[in-house]
Image (tube, helix red, strand yellow):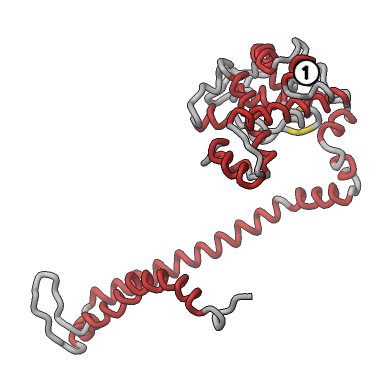
Amino acid sequence: MYTIRKVPSFFISIMFPAIVLVGSFVIYPVINGIYLSFTNYSPTSPILNWVNFENYIYLLGDPEFWEVVRNTLVIVFISTLFAVIFGFGLALLLVHLTDGSVAMAEKTAYRNGFGDQLAEGSRRLTARFGQPDLFMGVRGQEFPAYDGRAIQGMGLGYATSNRGACHLKSYTVSPEILGIPEKMDPHTTVGKAEITKIFQDITSAVDATGLCLFLTFGVGLEDMLPQLVAATGVSHTLESLTEAGERIWNLERLWNERAGVGKGSDTLPKRILHEPIPSGPAKGLVNRLGEMLPEYYRLRGWSEKGEVTPEKRKQLGLDRV
């Protein structure tokens, strides 16, 4: 274990830049300011004479100085007092308003009373009360933050995600909202099948590397490729890595098919498909999944029903699965 006693030069070398910066921009200006306060320094005059405490005597005798001090103290006191009282009061109010939510969360966690039913999840809960259409999700998983009516590609991603309504498996918010790698109109279906497939394949490849998916906001597969090759010793190209992602996606799809999750499951709740958004920039829109799904299946090389074909399995080396 390293200690300062064992390797002082190592720690000094690490701290030296910080010491220099602090000394240059904090300590030196303070010391120099104190020194200049005992002189008649003026930026317009080259003459510098020592005047002892004359500057302080003048300052303490200036009525405007005491007025500034008084105003500063009043502002600091009032602003601090207001911030503390207002913040504390707001916190108490929030605690009071959320008492019911906190209590219900505890009941759900310990499956007490109605919390026992909530713990089953919204899909089972809505079905229990005879209102399955109120469940907002896909394959038993609830929607995350994004409305598939306002962001068409996101809706397609939800409907076709192998693990249900997941935004991480095809984050088309990136091109549709953020404009990365290029801006796409979120309200149209043009090009959404292709970009959804691309994102799903790339995401599957990134997930397989073990790297955090959030890295893709700053780096792409081409940046991860040399790291992967260096770590595994396995030669890869950008094309082979993308194909690996596609193979993973199809393997997951085959798993779902074997588990009975396939035909007819690539859909969205009726509310998303038929109930228009009532207001805002996407007012009047529903998700037009029917326009995107056939093209998505075609680009995937699947059947018209969304089944992984024998040809696609052979192409990806999954013919023995």
Q: Residue at x 84, y 25 (%)?
A: 321
Q: Can residue 274 be seen? A: no
Percent from the top left, x then y, of residue 222? 54, 36
> How many numbered discs sit on the rendered protein?
1
Depth check: give the residue in front, 266 or 109.
266
Classify residue 205 as left or right of residue 309.
Answer: left
Residue 313 appears in the rendering: yes
Please, is residue 86 above or below residue 192 in the view? Answer: below
Residue at far bottom of view? 52
Within 10 Å of the Cα at label 1, are there few (<14), some (14-19), or many (20+) other Cα atoms? some
Residue 150 point in image, percent of width and height:
59, 24
Which residue is drawn at the image coordinates 88% and 43% (left, top)? 114
Q: Is residue 18 left or right of residue 61?
A: right
Quarter of the image holding residue 68? bottom left
202 or 130: nearer the viewer = 202
The residue carrying mark 1 is: 308
Q: Amino acid at mark 1?
A: Val
**235 lies left or right of 7:** right
Residue 265's place in the image compared with 305, above or below, is below
Question: Is residue 36 shown above or below 123?
Answer: below
